[in-house]
């Protein structure tokens, strides 16, 4: 984990765009897919940044490297100048698609990119992104919808998670949740390391900047949905795949619940002993 001094240094050097103008590095796109699962319920909606959780199980590239960059400084990595592969854990950006359930109200409306999602985003410090510059494909006639995204992969040092998680903040103002719907994530670039913070406000500020960086970076000519479009719009998707991923997610939820229950019982036992 970076020290407080390193964290401060990283923050003071934040570039407004990441990745080369020519387009994503060779290790991209890094893809993930599965149904949207429940997270740790920390009320991230109250923070202004709800995150759609997707499993890290069975993703081949997730355990491939991440150590290759140990010689590159954080600043180098953030500027996109590192010659090695980007780390796996950290904050990433790219495109995400959802196969929204039939009754989801957003199927009736075009994507509404929301750069001022959280109250903080009204601040003058954060440039309002010209939405017309972002080349979002038009909604298709199916239930699939594509949006820009930022996500974190890792252990959320601010919360000290014991398990690795992947959490996607989608730059769209949704009218309804979409737990259980199928999600495909196409990561195109790396923004920064996950950091620890002195308070929630500092975390929110950095996520706000991540959103600005992601939108500006994706608006460039070579960073559109491009070759990922057919996969993001459901290529190779089937009802069987959906059912299989749903079963696996339900199994994980059952295990998580059992672990939480056992933890609570242990706590009660310990309290009774005192
Ligand atoms: C773009 C983005 C950047 C994030 N950066 C960090 C970070 O640097 N450090 C950290 O501890 N958590 C970071 N998070 C994770 C938040 O802490 C996480 O979304 C929060 O724990 C909510 O968890 P929950 O949705 O499972 O309840 C980031 C999340 C997003 C979407
Ligand atoms: N813009 C958005 N990005 C991601 N998820 C969103 C968004 N808007 C609504 N949601 C919904 O909010 C849920 C996440 O809410 P959150 O408060 O982070 O709870 P959890 O702890 O279950 O992840 C997502 O699973 C999704 O259904």
Image (cartoon, rainbow, N blue to C red):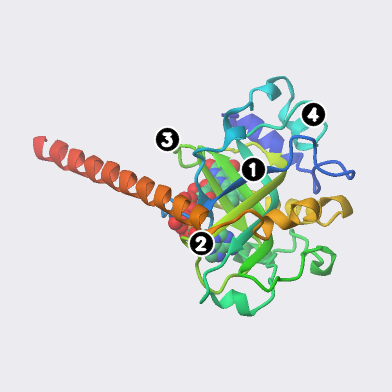
Disc 2 versus disc 1: nearer the observer? 2
Q: Which mark is residue 91?
A: 1
- Above or below — where is 28 with respect to 129? above
Tell me if 72 is positioned left or right of 106 in this view.
right
The residue at label 2 has a CB less than 8 Å from ligand 2? yes
User: Looking at the image, can residue 240 be seen?
Assistant: yes
Vertically, is 29 above or below 129?
above
Residue 17 placement (x, y as % from top left): 81, 47
From the image, tell me which residue sits under label 2. 181
Farthest-out residue, left: 273
Q: Residue at x 70, y 24 (%)?
A: 69
Q: Residue at x 47, y 62 (%)?
A: 179
The residues bearing labels 4 and 2 have C-alpha atoms spaced at a distance of 36 Å
- Give the residue pinned by disc 3: 162
Element at badge 4?
A: loop
Label drawn at residue 82: 4
Report the Cα–Cα distance between label 4 and label 1: 16 Å
Place of residue 221 in the rendered image (x, y in percent of width and height, measured from the top left): 88, 54
Disc 1 under 8 Å from ligand 1? The reply is yes
Q: Earlier in the sequence, mark 4 or mark 1?
A: 4
């Amino acid at each position: 984990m970076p020290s407080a001094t390193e964290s401060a240094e990283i923050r003071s050097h934040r570039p407004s765009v990441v990745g080369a103008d020519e387009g994503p590095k060779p290790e991209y796109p890094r893809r993930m897919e599965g149904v949207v699962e429940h997270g740790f319920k920390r009320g991230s909606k109250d923070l202004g940044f709800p995150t759609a959780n997707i499993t890290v199980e069975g993703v081949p590239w997730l355990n491939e490297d991440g150590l290759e960059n140990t010689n590159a400084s954080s600043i180098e990595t953030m500027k996109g100048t590192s010659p090695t592969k980007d780390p796996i854990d950290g904050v990433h950006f790219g495109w995400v698609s959802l196969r929204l359930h039939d009754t989801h109200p957003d199927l009736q409306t075009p994507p509404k990119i929301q750069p001022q999602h959280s109250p903080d985003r009204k601040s003058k410090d954060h440039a309002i992104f010209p939405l017309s510059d972002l080349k979002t494909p038009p909604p298709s006639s199916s239930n699939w919808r594509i949006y820009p995204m930022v996500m974190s992969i890792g252990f959320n040092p601010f919360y000290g998670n014991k398990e690795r998680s992947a959490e996607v903040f989608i730059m769209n103002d949704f009218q309804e949740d979409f737990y259980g719907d199928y999600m495909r994530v196409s990561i195109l670039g790396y923004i920064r390391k996950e950091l620890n913070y002195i308070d929630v406000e500092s975390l929110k500020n950095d996520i706000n900047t991540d959103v600005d960086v992601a939108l500006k970076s994706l608006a460039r000519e070579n960073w559109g949905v491009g070759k990922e479009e057919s996969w993001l719009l459901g290529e190779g998707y089937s009802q069987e795949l959906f059912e299989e991923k749903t079963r696996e997610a339900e199994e994980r939820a059952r295990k998580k619940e059992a672990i939480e229950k056992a933890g609570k019982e242990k706590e009660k036992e310990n309290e009774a002993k005192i």
